[in-house]
Image (cartoon, rainbow, N blue to C red):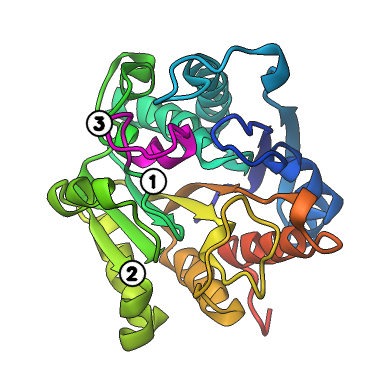
Amino acid sequence: MKPSTIAIIGAPLDMGSDRRGVDMGPSALRVANLNGKLSALGFNVEDVGNVSVKQPESMSVGARDAKYLREIATTCEKLGEKVERAFAEGKFPIVLGGDHSIAVGTVSGLARHLGSAGRTMGIIWIDAHTDMNTPATSPTGNVHGMPLAALMGYGPQELVEMFGFAPKVNPRNVALVGIRDVDVAERALVKDSGVTCFTMREIDERGMRSVMAEALEVANRGTDGFHLSLDLDCVDPDYAPGVGTPVAGGMTYREAHLAMEMAADSGRMLAMEVVEVNPVIDEVNRTANLAVELILSAMGKKILG
């Protein structure tokens, strides 16, 4: 059973990408009445506000193979502390991004709390991208393409060793769903790390029900539950145009909802984050509205109530 109280935590970070705008994602989701709609489902909702983030214009880019790394790490540490505190208080954290680099903070906070009690977690990473680059393989140096690698122990030490331990998750408990855009140099780590990767072809051939059932089995095998990391670019741009890195050929509206509904039915979700909503290139907050609908499905909303 999920906790009766949800903690909403905003992480308005957009330094992980070259395209600006996802820092407004938390506001767009709140404008779409996320809090009110979660309350209507019967949850107590506590919005703890946003993690403070400096503006890129006031920062040095730093090393070109991992841009803004220091500030991203600092922001993720602050986020991780908020997530850990909420989870320790028995609340269900929902983190609103921001670019996908914030996942380092969300998962690090969860993993530290679970690890202190000898517990472990899995991850279901729903995304068009694998986000398993390192500074050595990234063609752009954008850190939002590196968080999953860092959580498994690969990449910049500022991210890998956050809170003094690594890895945060065993790759064999990581399932990626909806993948359709992987950098050439990134592929070796995806293949060799031990993660389970479901591409869009597998969703096409097998259907979302089969793929998501196996993803849930991977993330829950020997763990105490899983974290759901949802990048809105998993959905086809026809349905979600306002995302950080849109890629054609993604999930349909119903496929995305089915994935969320199955996550809810499992009763094993520990926390959730929604990232890469970019109002700057959206259409009248359409993508944020979809994101809110998907969060509601993940939190148990059903067609027949």
Part of the protein shown in magenta: 133-148
Along the viewing direction, whichever of 195 and 190 lies nearer the viewer:
190
Q: Residue at x 67, y 60 (%)?
A: 291
User: Please, what is the three-letter code of the amino acid marked with disc 2?
Assistant: Thr
Tell me if residue 197 comes above or below residue 172 in the rendering: below
Percent from the top left, x then y, of residue 22? 68, 42
Question: Is 185 contained in the magenta span?
Answer: no
Percent from the top left, x then y, of residue 221? 21, 56
Percent from the top left, x then y, of residue 280? 78, 49
189 displayed left or right of 246: left
Percent from the top left, x then y, of residue 17? 56, 37
Q: Residues within 10 Å of mark 2 (few under 14, many from 20)?
A: many
Separation of residues labelled 2 and 3 (CA atoms): 22 Å
Report the magenta stretch's main SS: loop
Tag 2 and tag 1, C-beta contact below 8 Å: no
Mark sitting earlier along the chain (2/3) = 3
Along the viewing direction, whichever of 69 and 112 lies nearer the viewer:
69
Mark sitting earlier along the chain (1/3) = 1
87 displayed left or right of 131: right
User: Please, what is the three-letter code of the amino acid marked with disc 1?
Assistant: Asp
Label 1, on which residue?
Answer: 131
Residue 45 appears in view: no
Label 3, on which residue?
Answer: 154
User: Please, what is the three-letter code of the amino acid marked with disc 3?
Assistant: Tyr
Q: Secondary structure at mark 3?
A: loop
210 displayed left or right of 273: left
Label 2, on which residue?
Answer: 199
Question: Is 144 contained in the magenta span?
Answer: yes
Tag 1 and tag 3, C-beta contact below 8 Å: no
